[in-house]
Image: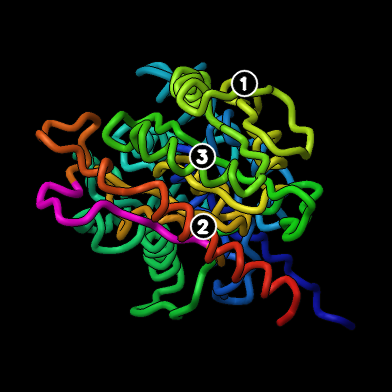
Amino acid sequence: MNEPTHRVDPYRLLVLAPNWLGDSVMATGLLDWLTGSVSLPGGRALHICWAVRAAWAPLFAHDPRIDELMVVERPGRHDGLKGVWNLGRDLARGNHDGAILGPPSLRVAMAARLAGIPVRVGYRTDGRGMLLSHGVESEARGTAHFSDEMVALGKAWLAAVAGLAETPVTTAQVKLHLAGDHPTVQSRPVPRLVLAPGATYGLAKTWPLNPALDFCRLCLEEGAELLLLGDAGSRSFAADLASGLSVAARHEVLGTPGLVDLTGRTGLLEVADLLQQCDGFAGNDSGLMHLAGALGIPTVGVFGSSNPAWTAPQGPRARAIAATGFPCQPCYRKTCNQPTFCLDSVTGHEVYHALSELRARSQTEGNGS
């Protein structure tokens, strides 16, 4: 007579993604590590619930690395003190065995504690150490890349649940899996390039008008279709670019040379689809920059107040250009308080030629040369 088999339930792991778009994209390195490197005791399967803000959730709706997608309603019912209680109750319904807390906030740790999740791993920030079952000491910004910081949380979680002193050293990639993924088109009659001139964080991360104008002129002289992408807050900058170039920007992608102003006119999935059909991206340190890099687009990120050692674009064809020679950089300020703004020193020619090199390398790789 056969012995009865005992079903072993999967380990239910909640991963709370960081709040910002770019940070959520960089946290996909953790997803990559979890699904490619983790082996739990007894061969127990891993069930990953990815909790992310509603605005970014569409990017992860078809990701095969995710078993369950939870939407964090901020703004909405998860805002404020009552929102912490609501989030805790919603998390409790998932019966999670453990949680990795990407956001460094007290409110997220409170919600996970209210949910009764036994293993709660996060950085000891915002005075929340007592709410974590396994706190990780945070280092100075730029000591490690943000994506590596997220993987470090995963390693701390695995060490806690598997009783390991050390976890496997593996390479994790920042990447996205979208419905209808298709490779970047590397050759077309008219090159399609993107400039994302906005940065929600503040003006100290925003490439100034004059060097951006020089970049645009070089793109248009190449005969490119140049798309301006960003939220509604970037519209005035886009209008200044069109005025400085003395061109009438259209609002439709036609596959013909010219300036196309799409700022404030596209949703997130539409932007992602446009990026996958582009030959190159340049922009400030922003969510769109990280999105482009993770999609494998030749990407140049321009860095002023922020630190490329911490948040450089990740991906197979990505590069950061930072202002140099400024002892105040990186300052992490929202606005510059110095007599000379560091980003004035990053020229349009420098960014254009860096992007051209990435595009040429990408085309060579695409041709298998």
- 269 to the left or right of 154: right
Q: Residues within 10 Å of mark 1 (few under 14, many from 20)?
A: few
Identify the residue under disc 1. Answer: 248
Considering only order in the chain, which callout, 3 or 1, is on the residue closer to the N terminus? 3
Nearer the observer, 228 or 93: 228
Question: Looking at the image, is mark 1 or mark 2 earlier in the sequence?
Answer: 1
Amino acid type indicated by mark 2 = Leu
For badge 1, the amino acid type reads: Ala
Can residue 86 be seen in this snapshot?
Answer: no
Observer-side mark, 1 or 2, equals 1
Please tell me in which quadrant of the rendered image residue 183 appears. bottom right
In the structure shown, which secondary structural element does the residue marked by tag 1 occupy?
loop
Q: Which residues are magenta?
A: 318-330
Identify the residue under disc 2.
355
- Tag nearer the camera, 3 or 2: 3
- Please name the amino acid that badge 3 sits on: Cys
At a point 59% along the width and 45% down the height, the residue shown is 221
